[in-house]
Amino acid sequence: MTPIFQKILVPVDFSDASPAVLSEAVTLAKVAGATLTVVHVIPPVSGGADMAIGPDAMMVDWRTPVNVTELEERLRTGTERQLRMAVADYLGQGVDIHVRTLWGSPFVEVIHAVQEEGYDLVVVGTHGRSAIARMFVGSTSTKLVRKCPCPVWVVKPGAKTPLDAILAPIDFSEVSHESLRLAGELAARLNSSLHVLHVFAREHDYLLDLMPEDDFDLRPPRRHELMSQLQAFARNSGLKIEPVLHVKQGDVTPLILSTADEVNAGLIVMGTLGRAGVAGLLIGNTAEKVLHASSRSLLATKPPGYTSPVPARLAHAVT
């Protein structure tokens, strides 16, 4: 059986959210047939810094001379020890697991690792839905959703497998083909039901603007047309299981959230770049809104050929 993913990268920060992220990633690696690399990113230590951040974090008095090399080595050793402890319970379960320490900005270093080593999925966590959480850790997951060249699976608190249902919102764009294909592969491997949703948004159809608000939901011909289009789109995506199709009218993000609740979806799979200026789901902006508003995990995909705006690391000059 062809693997869905071959190399999965899992950044962890040793917070309360990390065990759930790691557990989800290990389960996914088993069904996907992938190797797993678990990393922690440490901000670089400079001689002028008054605080080093890491699993063995310490306050460094600015009046005390600091051996930066020694401090970095201590941080690396402590980090790798904690990483080995974090994965210890999963060893011997048929998943090839590696641990690594990286230095720098977390989202930049994760993207560099993807660019340089060919990871085809990043599994990352978030601390929750509060504004403070989004500022602290959620900002890293949001930046990865926006800029990482490979799919990013954001594990929400309380997420667990197996997934009973997967929801794939689509807007008939190229990236929707990719997100639906991936959602179908996962549903088939995880024995989950697959629900495919298209939201017809009122503000994107000038004909609807000529109609009274009360008549908005009274357009059976248009609904039938969209359902037929959705059926054809699903067939052309090469799905291995029969999906449940949904066509709804109204505000996009609330309808994605309510549909996910309705079908008890444990995962929402959607693109982060989509169509603009046409009737349908503006998938890019919506993905981030769903990420921040939903309590359900999100798998965000990019279109084929997408290039990250984060430049690749420059190769070391040959001397």
Image (cartoon, grey):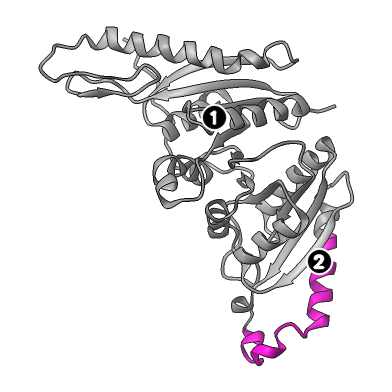
Q: Looking at numbered disc 2 in the image, what kind of residue is underneath it? A: Gln
Which mark is first along the chain, 2 or 1? 1
Horizontal and vertical percent position of residue 20: 61, 32
Check disc 1 and report the residue beneath it.
18
Residue 100 bears which disc, if any? none
Of 301 and 46, which appears nearest the observer? 46
Q: Looking at numbered disc 1 in the image, what kind of residue is underneath it? A: Ser
228 in the magenta segment: yes
Q: Secondary structure at mark 2?
A: helix
At horizontal 75% and vertical 52% (from top left) the residue drawn is 264
Of 3 and 38, which appears nearest the observer? 38
Where are the magenta residues, as a range?
206-232
At horizontal 41% and vertical 27% (from top left) the residue drawn is 313
Q: Relative to 156, is 144 on the left or the right?
A: left
Q: Is residue 272 above or below residue 262?
A: above
- Disc 2 crowd rating (10 Å Cα; few below 14, some 14-19, many 20+) is some
At horizontal 85% and vertical 61% (from top left) the residue drawn is 231
Q: Secondary structure at mark 1?
A: helix
- Quarter of the N terminus within the rendering: top right
Horizontal and vertical percent position of residue 89: 65, 15
Q: Is residue 51 above or below residue 134?
A: above
Check disc 2 and report the residue beneath it.
229
Q: Nearer the viewer, mark 1 or mark 2?
A: 1
At horizontal 43% and vertical 38% (from top left) the residue drawn is 310
Q: Relative to 47, is 317 on the left or the right?
A: right
